[in-house]
């Protein structure tokens, strides 16, 4: 085992690449503030049972992809494969349902799934997600969809398409499952082994099987949208009219089912240039399933690796990285001491600055300052130490002005 290689499916984020991440994370925090969402931070691991019940034990995620292990106390622990279950657990544990409702929360978190690593799909990946607990209102469905759309629009992504669907409630799904079972029964010999075992337990899952043969059979299966009950249908109509009211265009795609068991009623996806960037939906049964009171919920998740990939492919700007302000070069021992205390003082005064840390020659120091993109530089030698004055150089246009050293912080503000 090579200890100088990160585990398969994981990525290091190096200092020179982190500005992109800060940019999309800052934008996410900013839009959540504007939409009145507060951040929630839950543990990276939970009791395995939470995901078995919260994500659904016949889903691909639970059956094949979870990082599950026994801890030293013999408890089964799982690294979270998604964010909703942990947020729902916290909602119940801290009785947020007895607090001011709705409970609106967001998170930017690493998640873990044992998958075949490929472009945009990692075993440790990162998600921006939001959840709203406690409201059954269709305008909340439209609110979180509008949040996701605004976020992606403000980042500058092109050709954003919103697709929505309703997958009904457990009531309508009973009817639908029967119709599905009857349909897939006719094709049972062609289905893959996993789907054959799903047929009795959860025929809905067959609809997202990745096997091309199953997918082809699933394409002609009866659609849930044709089987939803009156209540679910009314809710879906309201969601559509709220979206229209907000000026958000959408298409209804009866093929969106989402891969997790807990969804009810509204499900949606946002696609940009054929890449699905965001997926979410309502999960009105989840809180009760986990042992909480009857409470509605809705949320979305947005994969950040995939988002960055889409932004790079579309040449979308990641904003201007904050520029370091000042480099203080020095020649000689005394100047080095003065540079040390100047840099420290300026940093305490809120200015980003740096000095030589490698005992370089003046020429090498200036090369470094150039490479690191400092906006200004000063050079300290014996004269500057004696007079307490120096020339402040604008690194971009080369212009210099003479300045008293104790006025540096003023000049750079
Ligand atoms: Zn229904
Ligand atoms: Zn299959």
Image (tube, grey):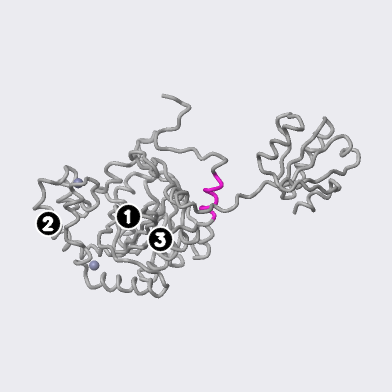
Rendered-image quadrant of the N terminus: top left
In this rendering, the label closer to the viewer, 1 or 3? 3
Rendered-image quadrant of the C terminus: bottom right
| Residue visible at 15% across and 50% down in the picture | 199
Give the secondary structure at mark 2: helix
Furthest residue in direction front, as rendered:
397
- Residue hosting label 1: 290
In this rendering, the label closer to the viewer, 3 or 2? 3
Judge from the rendering whether residue 223 lies leftward or rightward of residue 252; answer left or right.
left
| Residue visible at 76% across and 46% down in the picture | 398
- Residue hosting label 2: 183
Q: What stretch of residues is rendered in magenta?
A: 18-26
Judge from the rendering whether residue 387 lies leftward or rightward of residue 259; answer left or right.
right
Q: Which mark is residue 160?
A: 3
Residue 17, horizontal then vertical, whole percent: 54, 43
Whichever of labels 1 and 3 marks the residue nearer the N terminus, that label is 3
Is disc 2 surrounded by few (<14), some (14 to 19) or many (20+) residues within 10 Å? some
Which quadrant of the frame does ligand 1 lie within? bottom left
Q: Is any atom of residue 76 visible in this view?
A: no
Residue 379, horizontal then vertical, whole percent: 80, 39
Residue 160, horizontal then vertical, whole percent: 40, 61
Give the secondary structure at mark 1: loop
Looking at the image, residue 292 lies above or below residue 61: below
Whichever of labels 3 and 2 marks the residue nearer the N terminus, that label is 3
Furthest residue in direction top, as rendered:
1
Is disc 1 surrounded by few (<14), some (14 to 19) or many (20+) residues within 10 Å? some
Q: Nearer the viewer, residue 273 or 53?
A: 273
Q: CA distance from mark 2 to mark 1?
A: 32 Å
């Amino acid at each position: 085992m090579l200890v100088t290689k990160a585990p398969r499916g994981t990525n290091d984020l190096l200092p020179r690449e982190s500005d992109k991440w800060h940019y999309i994370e800052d934008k996410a925090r900013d839009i959540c503030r504007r939409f009145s969402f507060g951040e929630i931070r839950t543990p990276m691991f939970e009791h395995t049972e939470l995901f078995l019940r919260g994500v659904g034990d016949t889903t691909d995620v639970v059956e094949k992809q979870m990082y599950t292990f026994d801890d030293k106390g013999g408890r089964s622990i799982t690294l979270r494969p998604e964010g909703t279950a942990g947020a729902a657990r916290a909602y119940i544990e801290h009785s947020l349902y007895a607090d001011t409702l709705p409970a609106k929360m967001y998170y930017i978190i690493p998640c873990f799934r044992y998958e075949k690593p490929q472009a945009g799909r990692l075993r440790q990946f990162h998600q921006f997600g939001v959840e709203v607990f406690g409201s059954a209102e269709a305008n909340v469905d439209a609110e979180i969809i509008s949040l996701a759309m605004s976020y992606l629009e403000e980042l500058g992504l092109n050709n954003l398409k919103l697709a929505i669907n309703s997958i009904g409630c457990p009531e309508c799904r009973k009817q639908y499952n029967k119709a599905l079972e009857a349909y897939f029964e006719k094709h049972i010999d062609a289905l893959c082994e996993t789907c054959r075992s799903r047929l009795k337990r959860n025929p809905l899952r067959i609809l997202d099987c990745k096997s091309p043969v199953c997918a082809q059979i699933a394409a002609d299966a009866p659609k849930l949208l044709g089987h939803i009950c009156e209540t679910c249908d009314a809710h879906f109509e309201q969601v559509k009219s709220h979206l229209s009211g907000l000026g958000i265009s959408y298409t209804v795609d009866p093929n969106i089912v989402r891969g997790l068991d807990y969804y009810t009623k509204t499900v949606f996806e946002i696609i940009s240039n054929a890449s699905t960037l965001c997926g979410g939906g309502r999960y009105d049964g989840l809180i009760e399933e986990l042992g909480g009171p009857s409470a509605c919920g809705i949320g979305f998740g947005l994969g950040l690796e995939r988002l960055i990939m889409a932004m790079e492919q579309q040449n979308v700007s990641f904003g201007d990285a904050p520029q370091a302000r000042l480099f203080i070069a020095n020649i000689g021992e005394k100047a080095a001491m003065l540079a040390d205390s100047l840099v420290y003082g300026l940093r305490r005064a809120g200015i980003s600055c740096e000095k030589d840390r490698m005992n370089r020659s003046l020429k090498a120091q200036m090369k470094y300052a150039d490479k690191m993109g400092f906006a200004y530089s000063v050079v300290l030698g014996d004269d500057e130490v004696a007079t307490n004055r120096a020339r402040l150089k604008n690194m971009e246009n080369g212009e210099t002005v003479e300045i008293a050293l104790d006025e540096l912080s003023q000049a750079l503000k």
